[in-house]
Image (spheres, rainbow, N blue to C red):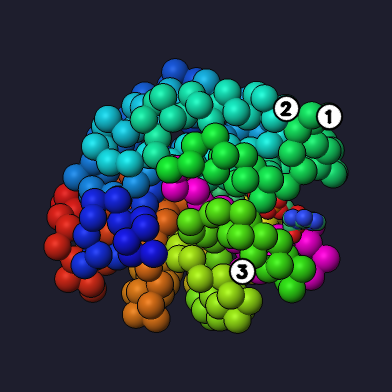
Amino acid sequence: MDQIISFKGSSIEPILSFEFFPPKDAVAAEKLMQTVTSLRACSPDFVSITYGAGGSTRALTLEYTEKLGQAFGCATMPHLTCVGHSRDELVEIIQSFRQAGAKQIMALRGDPPRGEKEFKPHPSGLHHASELVTLIRETFPECIIGVAGYPEKHPEATSLEDDLLHLRDKVAAGADFITTQLFFDNKIYFRFVEQCRDLGIKVPILPGLMTILSRPQAERFCALCGTTMPQSLLSALDEAGEDADAVEAVGVDWTAGQVLNLLDGGAPGIHLYLLNRARPTLSLLRRLQAGLKLHRYFPQ
Ligand SMILES: Cc1cc2nc3c(=O)[nH]c(=O)nc-3n(C[C@H](O)[C@H](O)[C@H](O)COP(=O)(O)OP(=O)(O)OC[C@H]3O[C@@H](n4cnc5c(N)ncnc54)[C@H](O)[C@@H]3O)c2cc1C
């Protein structure tokens, strides 16, 4: 893993990656670029850019693949989903990512469009992320491919065991690494890694972490993803109550504790779902710098 996703060629430090979503309007675009300016000195190994439901951000994902790559001076990883696209369209999009300089793609099936319960593939499209991995391998052989893993099971999966077998299919199709869904309980990540290894899944498994900035928002995400919150986290949030700064402090504290324990337990790095926000990310990274004695410099 360290070799595969340490794009800067260093295997000394743990991997640090940031995930952004494309801005919805001009105001959000300006805020995103301010966030990027604040975080540039953190020198992530790569940044990823999500792909909106049903291809709604196709052009923006491409635009920000180029923009964020230039701004950070690092590798960028556009996400791609199968929702609403034919196989031919997917090939076109993969080629456009390649032309934009992306050397890696996060290959996803995607969620059903809003208001629909079940994922329905495009009539000439793909059914599962594993098929997208195969397509990317065929059209862009040298690409580094990431796929999603679900330590607490994908919400649609009939069992964790089934879900893990499907994850194994994605890796067998050619995925180079796995990024996990967000989780707040490290025991669940370590158990997931063990279960993957038992099934012969050998690729790196990068933990995906989100710092809680608002309790209702976090509860909404958890309900959507099937992520659980440990009682001690819920109690700390209870104590913070409606005070937004106190909630953010609990969130940063919790993520910092998770990161230290994850790296101590052998995780290859961290992928931060930073919700396009700089301040909590900087607070977190400064805390970690002290705890990990990283060589990276995080701005004060
Ligand atoms: C790191 C990460 C990044 C994400 N980024 C985005 C993004 O940018 N845009 C976005 O819209 N969504 C994103 N998502 C959400 C993701 O699209 C959803 O979770 C989606 O519902 C599943 O996508 P997948 O790639 O995991 O699908 P798959 O791996 O195809 O799995 C989906 C479901 O189908 C099952 N399955 C897989 N293969 C088979 C098979 N052969 N037969 C039967 N069942 C099967 C799986 O067990 C699972 O329940 C992201 C999720 C993660 C964890």
Which numbered disc flags the more N-terminal residue, 2 or 1? 2
Q: Is residue 31 above or below residue 193?
A: above
Q: Is residue 34 left or right of residue 160?
A: left
Which numbered disc flags the more N-terminal residue, 3 or 1? 1
State the residue position of label 2.
86
State the residue position of label 1.
123
Verify CB contact (< 8 Å) between mark 2 and mark 1.
Answer: yes
286 or 73: which is nearer to us?
73
The answer to if 264 sits in the magenta stretch is no
- Helix, strand or loop at disc 1? loop
| Mark 2 nearby-residue class (10 Å; few <14, some 14–19, many ≥20) | some
Q: Amino acid at mark 2?
A: Ser
| Most common secondary structure along the magenta stretch | loop
- The residue sitting at 44% across, 30% down in the picture is 98
What's the magenta region? 143-159
The answer to whether one can see residue 185 in this image is no
